[in-house]
Image (cartoon, helix red, strand yellow):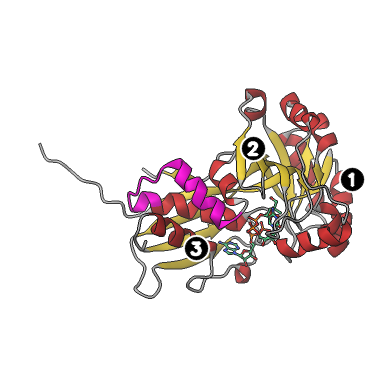
């Protein structure tokens, strides 16, 4: 009997965008980060990252980008060492005491600097893809620790689903209640052509909220609303402390939120540090109707369900 060994030639990993259904922000810590208490949800809008054997001596991880029409490709740094994917490869390699080489292609559908954690999705996807390409078998706890070093949102990008985030957002706990884990919500997503910088929105929060609390929590009523599986109940508790500073920096976002609600959404909210606006709808049909109405005024209107899985390998047969 002949034995056939399979050589790994390409690993594709899909990683989702996130939204924050609830985001409470406290006063800046001595390290400059803000304590947060958030409910993350991964939604069905993805970047796909494919890693192949490659890389060069001076650029161990060579990047190529294929951007969807609605993505500002010029805003994604690709030069050696500049992308979160480079940093993910460095940290994962350092954990294993070696340099990881690869040619990496990012197929990007998550808008850049949109408050949707697209860079974090790519970093999480890179950790999973490079681990598999090089057969490193890194334990989940080590991957989560490396993810936390890469950015506050990166551990959640690995995890996906619906999860609580505390600390600076890097301490994530999935909601184990099946009523929360198995719920399906429908979102209309309206990205903006020009992104917003996360640090500048947090700095503006500091100016607007000198009274911010030292510690913050996710209230029980938010968790109860998630478990209710009722979109009207969830709509009433959606909240984002970064929305006021984002609207102050981008006043036109108030019109976007009003337009979405006038188009029939239950509630609109800015995602994370913005400027993307997301709208909770009552059903898949209602989401499609709201999106159809908004398409008359906005260039890019997407429909996505949540929760979906975190960074995971896509198998082709
Ligand atoms: C606002 C949120 C909400 O989920 O998401 P985005 O809107 O960026 O997607 C996150 O807190 C963003 O997380 P992420 O984008 O990973 O931030 P990091 O790379 O860790 O930090 C970038 C910068 O944001 C600020 N920052 C971030 C997280 C935090 N808890 N407090 C902060 O003050 C700091 O100025 C930091 O230098
Ligand atoms: N793979 C990547 N994709 C997108 N942006 C990246 C990536 N790597 C580094 N960046 C930088 O991170 C910034 C924030 O990107 P992103 O994660 O899309 O936004 P947000 O923090 O609002 O969710 C970008 O403006 C860009 O300069």
Q: CA distance from mark 2 to mark 1?
A: 30 Å
Decide if residue 25 is on the left or right side of residue 146: right
User: Is residue 112 depicted above or below 277 in this figure?
Assistant: below
Q: Quadrant of residue 186?
A: top right
Q: Quadrant of residue 181?
A: top right
In front: 59, or 143? 143
| Residue denoted by label 1 | 262
Residue 272: x %, y % from top left: 73, 51
In front: 172, or 184? 172
Q: Residue furthest front?
A: 30
Q: CA distance from mark 2 to mark 3?
A: 25 Å
| Residue denoted by label 2 | 163
Residue 144: x %, y % from top left: 51, 46
User: Is residue 264 depicted above or below 134 in this figure?
Assistant: above
- Nearer to us: label 3 or label 1: 3
| Residue denoted by label 3 | 87
Q: Helix, strand, or loop for circle 1?
A: helix
What crowding class fits label 2: few (fewer than 14 Cα within 10 Å), some (14-19), or many (20 or more)? Answer: many
Start-end of magenta stretch: 131-151
The residue lying at 59 percent from left, 45 percent from top is 156
- In terms of sequence position, does the residue under pointer 2 or pointer 3 come before the other? 3
Q: Quadrant of the N terminus?
A: top left
Residue 252: x %, y % from top left: 87, 61
Assess whether residue 141 is covered by the magenta stretch. yes
The residue lying at 83 percent from left, 31 percent from top is 232
Q: Main secondary structure of the magenta part?
A: helix
The residue lying at 60 percent from left, 60 percent from top is 68
Assess whether residue 55 is covered by the magenta stretch. no
Q: CA distance from mark 3 to mark 1?
A: 43 Å
């Amino acid at each position: 009997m002949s034995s056939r060994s399979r050589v790994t030639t390409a690993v594709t990993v899909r990683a989702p965008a996130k939204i924050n259904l609830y985001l409470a922000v406290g006063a800046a810590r001595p390290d400059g980060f803000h304590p947060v208490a958030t409910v993350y949800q991964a939604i069905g809008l993805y970047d796909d990252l494919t890693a192949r054997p490659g890389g060069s001596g001076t650029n161990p991880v060579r990047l190529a980008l294929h951007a969807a029409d609605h993505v500002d490709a010029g805003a994604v740094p690709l030069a050696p060492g500049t992308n979160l994917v480079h940093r993910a490869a460095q940290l994962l390699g350092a954990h294993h005491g070696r340099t990881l080489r690869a040619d990496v292609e990012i197929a990007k559908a998550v808008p850049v600097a949109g408050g949707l954690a697209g860079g974090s999705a790519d970093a999480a996807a890179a950790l999973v893809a490079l681990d598999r390409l090089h057969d490193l078998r890194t334990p989940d706890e080590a991957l989560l620790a490396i993810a936390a070093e890469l950015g506050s949102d990166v551990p959640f990008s690995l995890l996906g689903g619906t999860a609580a985030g505390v600390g600076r957002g890097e301490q994530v706990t999935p909601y184990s209640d099946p009523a929360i884990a198995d719920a399906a919500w429908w979102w209309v997503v309206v990205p903006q052509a020009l992104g917003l910088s996360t640090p500048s929105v947090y700095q503006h929060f500091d100016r607007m909220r000198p009274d911010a609390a030292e510690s913050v929590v996710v209230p029980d009523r938010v968790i109860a609303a998630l478990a209710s599986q009722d979109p009207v109940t969830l709509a009433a508790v959606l909240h984002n402390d970064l929305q006021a500073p984002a609207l102050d920096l981008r006043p036109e976002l108030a019109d976007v939120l009003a337009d979405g609600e006038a188009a029939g959404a239950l509630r609109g909210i800015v995602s994370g540090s913005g400027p993307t606006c997301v709208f909770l709808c009552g059903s898949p049909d209602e989401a499609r109707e709201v999106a159809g109405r908004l398409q008359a005024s906005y260039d890019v209107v997407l429909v996505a369900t949540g929760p979906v899985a975190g960074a995971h390998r896509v198998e082709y047969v």
